[in-house]
Amino acid sequence: MKHFLSIALSVAMLLSFSLISETANAQLLNRIKNEVQNRTENKVVQEVSSNIDNTMDKVKNKATDTSKNKKPAINDDNDTKTQAISSTQSKITVADYKSYDFVPGDQIIFQPDLSAETDAELPARFRIQKGNAEIQSYEGEKILHLDAGEYATVMPLMNNSSYLPEQFTVEFDMMYENDKDYFAYVNDFRIQFFEQGDENYEGYGLYEFTIISNARVVLGQHSNSGSLVNESLQKSLQTNNRWHHIAIYVRKNIAKAYIDAYRAAASNTMPEGAAKLAIRTDGKYGIKIKNVRIAAGGDDKYNKIATDGKFATHGILFDVNKSSIKPESMGTLNEITKLMKDHSDLNFEIDGHTDSDGNDDANIKLSQARADAVKTQLVNMGIDANRLTTKGFGETKPIDKNDNAEGKANNRRVEFVKI
C-alpha cells in the first residue's frame, strides 16, 4: 500500500511539474509574441514617422527653394532696375554688363581644354601645389574642382616658370559650393602673383586679388581686411550655386579686378615683376572653376588700325557652337562702340573665324552667324548699320596652329577690317 501511494504521489508531482512547465512555456511564448508584435508596431510607427518627417522636409525645402528663386528687383550702380540672379543661375544678358569695361589681352598664352579629360582624375594642365583637386563633370561641362576641408593651391602647368608679360589679363569662372542657405564661415578665395624664382607658395607672393567672406576684396599686397564691395555685388556673391566671372587686368603698376559685371577694385601702385600665378582657397568651401584664360598684351585698337588696317579680338565670346554672345563680351563691344563713335570715318567689315574642329561648311555658317550677331549688337548700341558689313571665314584663315588648346583659342576670333 505504501509503495502504491509513493508511486501515485510521484506521478502527481510529475504531472504538476509538466503543467507548470507548459504554462511557463505558454507564458514565455506569449511574451515573445507580444514583444515581436510591439517591436513590429514600433518599427512601423518609426517608419511612418520618418516618412512624414522626410515629406515635411521636402515640403519645407521646396518652399525655401521657391522663396530663394524669387527674383526681386534691385538697383545696380547706375540706379537702373535689374533682376537679381536666383540660386539656380538665371540667364544673364548683355544688358547686365552694359557698363563693363574689361578687355582681354589679344594673345592667348594659357587656355586649357578640359572637355576630353576624365572625371575624378588629376587635371592635365594644372599643377596641384597643395590639397586636392580633380576634374569633374557639372551640368554638361568639365570643371576643375578644389576640395573643401583644407587649403588647396593650383597653378597653370606651363613650359617655363616665368610666363606673365608686362601686360596681361586673367579670366575664369568660379562657383562656391555651399549646402546651406547662407555662408556660415569666414573664408577667402585668392589669386596670388609671384616673382620669378619665388617658390614659397605658402607665402603671399608679390601681390594678390582676394575675395574675403563674399563681401570684401584685396587687390595689391596681402591684407586681412580689404575693401567692402557694393551691395549688389555682395548679394550676388552670397547667392548659392551661381557662377561668378573673375577678370583681372595688369599693365605695369596698374591693375583692375572685376567680379561679374562689376569693377571690384583698381590700383595704380601695384608692385611690378609678376611672373606666374596660383589659385588658392582656404578649404572652408569647395570651389568649381572653368573657362580659365590668360592672355598677353592688349594694344590700342586705333593704333592697330593705323598700322595694319585691322585688329583682331578674342574678347567677343560665344556659347559653344552657337552665335549667341556671352555677356562678358560687353567690355570689348563697349570699347569698339566708343572707337566708332569717336571716329566717324571708321567703317568695318566684321570677319568671323573658327578653329579647325568640326565640319568645314558648318564652321563657315557658324562664323558668318557670329559676325552677323556682332553687327546686330553694335547696331543696337548705336552704330549705323551702313558702317558695318560681315563675312564668315570659318577655319580658312588661321593665325596659329590648330594642334593645341591655345592655338585653337587664338584662331577663334573676330576681326575688324577697315573698309
Image (spheres, grey):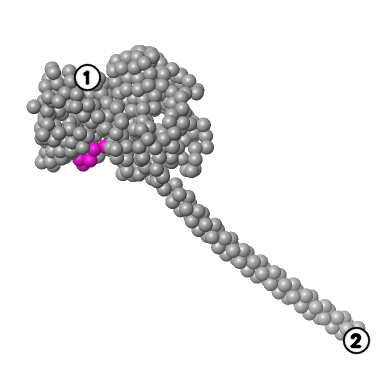
> Residue most toward the bottom?
1
Horizontal side, residue 145 vs residue 308: left or right: right
Label pair 1/2, CB-CB below 8 angstroms: no
First along the sequence among labels 1 and 2: 2
Question: What amino acid is found at the position of numbered circle 2 in the picture?
Answer: Met
Q: Return the residue nearer the eye: 29 or 155.
A: 155
Q: Residue at x 43, y 41 (%)?
A: 240
Horizontal side, residue 274 vs residue 302: left or right: right
The span shown in magenta is 322-326
Q: Position of residue 63 (x, y in %)?
A: 47, 53
Q: Return the residue nearer the eye: 336 or 138.
A: 336
| On screen, residue 70 above or below 270 | below
| On screen, residue 131 above or below 360 | above
Q: Residue at x 34, y 25 (%)?
A: 248
Horizontal side, residue 237 vs residue 302: left or right: right
Q: For mark 2, what is the residue?
A: 1
Question: What amino acid is found at the position of numbered circle 1 in the picture?
Answer: Asp
Crowding around mark 1 (Cα neighbors within 10 Å: few <14, some 14 to 19, many 20+) is: few
Q: Position of residue 38 (x, y in %)?
A: 64, 66
- The quarter holding residue 375 reads top left
CA gap between label 1 and label 2 equals 133 Å
Q: Position of residue 114 (x, y in %)?
A: 29, 35
Crowding around mark 2 (Cα neighbors within 10 Å: few <14, some 14 to 19, many 20+) is: few
Which numbered disc covers residue 299? Answer: 1
Q: Return the residue nearer the eye: 418 or 9.
A: 418
Q: Quadrant of the C terminus?
A: top left
Q: Is residue 341 visible in this depiction of the protein?
A: yes
Count of picture labels: 2
- The quarter holding residue 345 reads top left
Q: Position of residue 120 (x, y in %)?
A: 37, 39
> Residue most toward the right?
2
